[in-house]
């Protein structure tokens, strides 16, 4: 029975901010796969070739010779296949005549697609191609990312879940809770029965970390998430390289270095947003170098705000002395005019359009952005400012609080099972078999091609070497990232070709990726597949929602000086204790210990 769904979900909704997009894919076929490793693993196993006829000399061997060599005889017997072998039902596409089968899907529609001429998934050519290939028509219910969490709660409370739900595990706050409360189904058995392409790839040893993330601590498969053939951080700190060179400054590494550079930029170039921060999410990009965890998950669809582990002991960033030291530094930067004056109230819509003017006008020297924007900003700015140049720089670190220049809070592989991404099958779905086979299509060779490159002749063309390359239409569009989302199924649960855009990037973009990858690891992160069970999630959510609201408000006031960190920090800690933050930490310690016990 669905018990107390509305009240629970509305509480969870307070914790979840960044919303998931829909996914999609394509069927098995003769088209080359974007990731060569999948061309073999995603295909149905072929029949073994017939044995060669035995040579006459071998046939005339005596019984004595045969009995004298039992080991040789046994070695010729068929060997048992090694590794995972799918034993379920392989789907054949299309599953039916196009449009014969129907599914419904609830998901968020990214507003930035309007900027490339798209207003609904229902009108996207790639989705129409998927329908033709699978024989399944999908009717989308689309919501804005600004209110998707609230809409999800209302949908579930009314028992109006669609067949497929985008981001359900993130919106609900607990994958096992969403299954127990009969919002979504456990796909572990249906996937083994109907999803041969997905299961074959998931069980490839090279994707072991993704398999670990796919199942929650109770062994449930709550959603289907993408797998990447590689991973690097593609977002990070960027700096005006031309300003550094003109002022004869070294690339900053520590917080003290950053402060020196920011002061020089502020003085020489009169920046109003010397360090450009857009909302609390970007504010927390700075904190890892203090050896503690920020609160970015409050706006990233998770419910583990500030939770991390050191040697198996769960900690919460709000309680760390290093967090206090970090806020003290930010207050000093704020007082000296080095921070964006409106960083707390500024919004970051994911596309960074609100940041473009500030960056291009020379009103900022350091900011956080996606790497692909580096070339875009340079090309636009160099029309009037030929020396304009950007480079990616490593996150800052504190020799006092961190054990070196590498910070330890980055998830080093793709999206987790408990994240806001991925597609789930709801309990209202009456045709689970079709839903699973439809999802499995995205893991076939042709499905991967559609997800990664789109439709031949529109999204891509084959090069002389026989590999797909993005078309001029995509490359010359308003924004490459937006064009990719609009004319491929890049957000679909599929095997993602991580390097597919790299050929379009300039050297300084690729160097930025390498820089960001070299300065992070996951030493202190919680396991990506760690999740709270229903009881733990209910207890945690009822407590932590109020803590988050209080803490975010206090942190902003500490930075601006409305609260004196010397006088008011102890009261902040007392209030966290009174609001039962220690119980939240204990809940995660319990869940973490259970996870370690079950995973070894």
Image: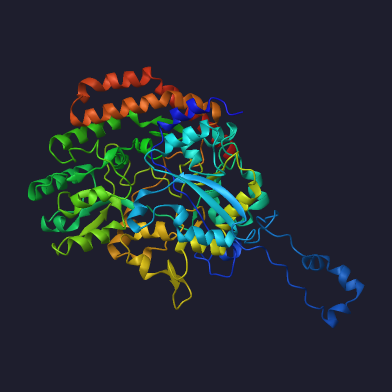
Task: Residue 134: tell me if it is visible.
Answer: yes
Q: Residue furthest right?
A: 63
In this rendering, would 331 be left or right of 35? Answer: left
Q: Position of residue 146 (x, y in %)?
A: 36, 40
Coloring applied to the structure? rainbow
Percent position (x, y) of residue 290? Answer: 30, 38
State which quadrant residue 314 falls in.
Answer: top left
Measured as percent of width and height from the top left, residue 19 is found at 41, 42
Residue in the picture at 19% in, 41% down:
340
Residue 234 seen by the camera: no
Q: Position of residue 448 (x, y in %)?
A: 52, 61
What count of labels does the image hold? 0
Q: Using the image, determine if residue 437 lies above or below residue 597.
A: below
Above or below, comparing residue 154 to residue 109 in the picture: above
The one of 164 and 566 positioned closer to us in this rendering = 164
The answer to whether 466 is drawn above or below residue 299 in the figure is below
Please determine whether, in this image, residue 54 is positioned above or below residue 417.
below
Q: Is residue 458 left or right of residue 434?
A: left
The structure residue drawn at horizontal position 30% and vertical position 30%, both measured from the top left corner, is 552
Q: Nearer the viewer, residue 29 or 332?
A: 29
Residue at the image position 30 percent from the left and 42 percent from the top: 285
């Amino acid at each position: 029975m669905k018990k107390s769904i509305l009240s629970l979900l509305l509480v969870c909704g307070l914790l979840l901010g960044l919303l998931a997009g829909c996914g999609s894919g394509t069927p098995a076929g003769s088209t080359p796969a974007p990731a060569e490793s999948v061309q073999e693993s995603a295909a149905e196993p072929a029949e073994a070739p017939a044995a060669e006829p035995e040579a006459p000399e071998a046939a005339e061997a005596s019984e004595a010779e045969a009995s004298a060599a039992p080991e040789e005889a046994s070695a010729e017997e068929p060997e048992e296949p090694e590794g995972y072998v799918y034993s379920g039902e392989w789907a054949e596409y299309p599953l039916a005549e196009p449009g014969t089968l129907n599914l419904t899907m609830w998901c968020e529609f990214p507003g930035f697609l309007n900027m490339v001429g798209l207003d609904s998934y229902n009108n996207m050519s790639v989705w129409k191609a998927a329908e033709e290939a699978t024989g399944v028509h999908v009717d989308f219910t689309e919501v804005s990312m600004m209110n998707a969490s609230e809409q999800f709660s209302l949908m579930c409370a009314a028992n109006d879940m669609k067949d497929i739900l985008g981001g359900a595990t993130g919106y609900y706050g607990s994958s096992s809770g969403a299954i127990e409360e009969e919002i979504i189904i456990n796909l572990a058995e249906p996937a083994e029965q109907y999803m041969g392409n997905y299961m074959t790839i998931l069980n490839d040893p090279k994707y072991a970390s993704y398999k670990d993330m796919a199942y929650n601590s109770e062994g449930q498969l709550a959603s289907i998430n993408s797998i990447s053939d590689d991973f690097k951080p593609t977002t990070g700190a960027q700096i005006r390289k031309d300003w550094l060179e003109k002022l004869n400054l070294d690339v900053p590494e520590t917080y003290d270095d950053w402060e020196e550079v920011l002061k020089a930029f502020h003085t020489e170039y009169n920046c109003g947003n010397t360090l450009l921060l857009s909302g609390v999410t970007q504010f927390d990009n700075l904190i890892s170098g203090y050896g503690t965890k920020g609160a970015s998950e409050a706006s990233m669809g998770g419910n583990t705000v500030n939770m991390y582990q050191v040697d198996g002991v769960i900690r919460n960033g709000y309680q760390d002395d290093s967090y206090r030291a970090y806020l003290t530094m930010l207050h000093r930067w704020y007082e000296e005019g080095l921070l964006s004056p409106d960083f707390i109230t500024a919004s970051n819509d994911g596309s960074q359009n609100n940041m473009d003017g500030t960056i291009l006008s020379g009103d900022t020297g350091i900011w956080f952005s996606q790497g692909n924007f580096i070339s875009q900003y340079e090309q636009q700015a160099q029309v009037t400012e030929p020396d304009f140049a950007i480079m990616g720089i490593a996150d800052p670190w504190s020799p006092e609080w961190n054990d070196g220049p590498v910070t330890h809070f980055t998830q080093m592989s793709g999206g987790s099972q408990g994240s806001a991404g991925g597609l789930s099958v709801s309990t209202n779905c009456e045709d689970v078999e079709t839903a699973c086979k439809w999802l499995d299509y995205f893991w076939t060779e042709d499905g991967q091609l559609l997800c990664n490159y789109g439709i031949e002749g529109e999204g891509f063309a084959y090069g002389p070497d026989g590999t797909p390359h993005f078309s001029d239409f995509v490359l010359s569009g308003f924004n490459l990232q937006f064009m990719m989302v609009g004319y491929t199924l890049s957000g679909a649960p599929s095997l993602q070709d991580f390097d597919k855009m790299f050929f379009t990037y300039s050297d300084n973009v690729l160097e930025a990726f390498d820089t960001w990858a070299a300065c992070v690891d996951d030493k202190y992160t919680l396991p990506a597949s760690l999740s709270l069970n229903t009881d733990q999630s209910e207890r945690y959510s009822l407590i932590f929602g109020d803590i988050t609201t209080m803490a975010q408000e206090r942190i902003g006031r500490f930075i601006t000086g409305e609260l004196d960190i010397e006088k008011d920090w102890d009261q902040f800690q007392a209030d966290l204790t009174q609001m039962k933050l220690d119980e939240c930490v204990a809940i995660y310690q319990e869940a973490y210990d259970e996870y370690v016990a079950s995973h070894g």
